[in-house]
Amino acid sequence: MKTLVKNIKELVGIETTPQLRKQGKEMSRLETVKDAYLIVEDGKFAAFGPMRAENGDAYPDSIKNAKFDIEIDATDRLVFPSFCDSHTHLVYANSREMEFVDKIRGLSYEEIAKRGGGILNSAKATAAASEDELYDMAWRRLEEVMRLGTGAIEIKSGYGLTTESELKLLRVIRRLKENSPLTIKSNFLGAHGIPMEYRGHQEDYVDLVINEMIPLVAAEGLADFIDVFCDQGFFTCEDTERILDAGIKYGMRPKIHANEMAISGGVQVGVKYGAISVDHLEQMGDAEIECLKGTETMPTILPGCAFFLNLPLSPARKMVDAGLPVAMASDYNPGTSPSNNMQLILSMACIRYRLTPEEAFNATTLNTAYAMGVSNELGSIAVGKKANFYITKSIPSYEYMPYAYGENKVERIFLNGVEL
């Protein structure tokens, strides 16, 4: 199958020399082609460039001398690489709007968790739901995600907190991988919260995660990554090191929830264990920024969570100015970030975190692809990469994307080169 998208007002996020990620000043570089064409063949980007040839002909040779199965006229429309959402908890059984009301009344996330709400609330509902029920709910959410321009997504477990329920969640994620056109990565987050029966002796729950859950997850090949909520009131640095060490032995690459509630040491643990990303980072000091310099670990900010919980904002501007890469993901989940809209995250990156539109696009595409381990095939428009992209409605410029927050600017979506 060979597809031509022609008369593109502006083709955004191209790479002639692909990079795995962008950092520091590189994040302000966003390559585009105006009055462009894009050729997709066999599910991959095959060619792109200006519609008018250098000699002044109406079409370059790559269009003039080729036959296409499908031709799409994108006049007055922009084309972007699909968003990559590198941090979600998309498989869950219930919404938690009553806790939302508790937050309005002044209770903190930590206080709600201590009385059995939060993650434990979702764990109870997950235990009661069947695998098929969880799958059907998650499938509907994935369809919503696609319509908003996301083409790749990482999904965590963590609403199980028992061996049986954690395996159930991961099996749902595996079914989604097998059936969805999205690129999906799975993350085992058995250490997401501490069950009530383990309060006061959480080391026994850590033993359960290490000695029972991880071997069974690995035996079924259910997880690409292993994750830990390393933060105040949750898992300690020592707990985290033990769990990551065990996961690495079974071939799972680390990720970490770090520094949401306090400067926890989670960033340093993540770097020590070669985590592909450390996520949240609402609480960051100079030591954490210095620790991340020169490493392969992607600092990942979750604007939706900070917005929903009224948390301090991660110092994204300071991090970029210090030469770090920054990724921004949705943290889509029922308790602390009930939004799957990466267009909104793009807007928040500019409005609340003071990133330029160029930096924000790189933070939500290429750098989030890196945080999922897929930036060699996703996150930009480059020859040979998987053809995940979307065509916008008629909009004036790429700056309009973060500017017009709350509006869905996506008109047509393509995953693996196929329109959906």
Image (cartoon, helix red, strand yellow):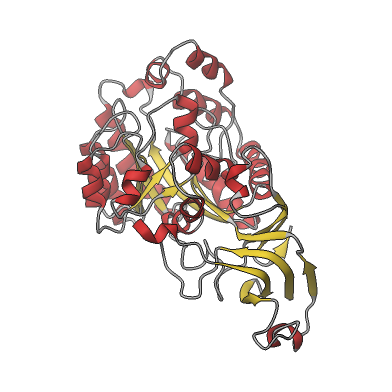
Occupied quadrant, residue 280: top left
Q: Position of residue 347 (x, y in %)?
A: 55, 42
Q: Is residue 350 left or right of residue 213?
A: right
Q: Is residue 305 left or right of residue 339?
A: left
Say which of 289 and 198 sits in front: 289
Q: In the figure, 156 relative to 259: above or below?
A: below
Q: Is residue 242 visible?
A: no
Task: Identify the residue at image location x=57%, y=40%.
Answer: 344
Q: Position of residue 127 (x, y in %)?
A: 53, 29
Q: Is residue 75 visible?
A: yes
Q: Position of residue 248 (x, y in %)?
A: 30, 54
Q: Quadrant of the N terminus?
A: bottom right
Q: Position of residue 406 (x, y in %)?
A: 64, 37
Q: In the figure, 384 relative to 64: above or below?
A: above
Q: Is residue 221 left or right of residue 399?
A: left
Task: Identify the residue at image location x=24%, y=43%.
Answer: 288
Q: Is residue 416 left or right of residue 100?
A: right
Task: Identify the residue at image location x=68%, y=75%.
Answer: 39
Q: How many marks?
A: 0
Say which of 26 and 161 sits in front: 26
Q: Quadrant of the C terminus?
A: bottom right
Q: Residue furthest top?
A: 105
Say which of 9 and 160 sits in front: 9
Say which of 347 and 376 sits in front: 347
Occupied quadrant, residue 41: bottom right
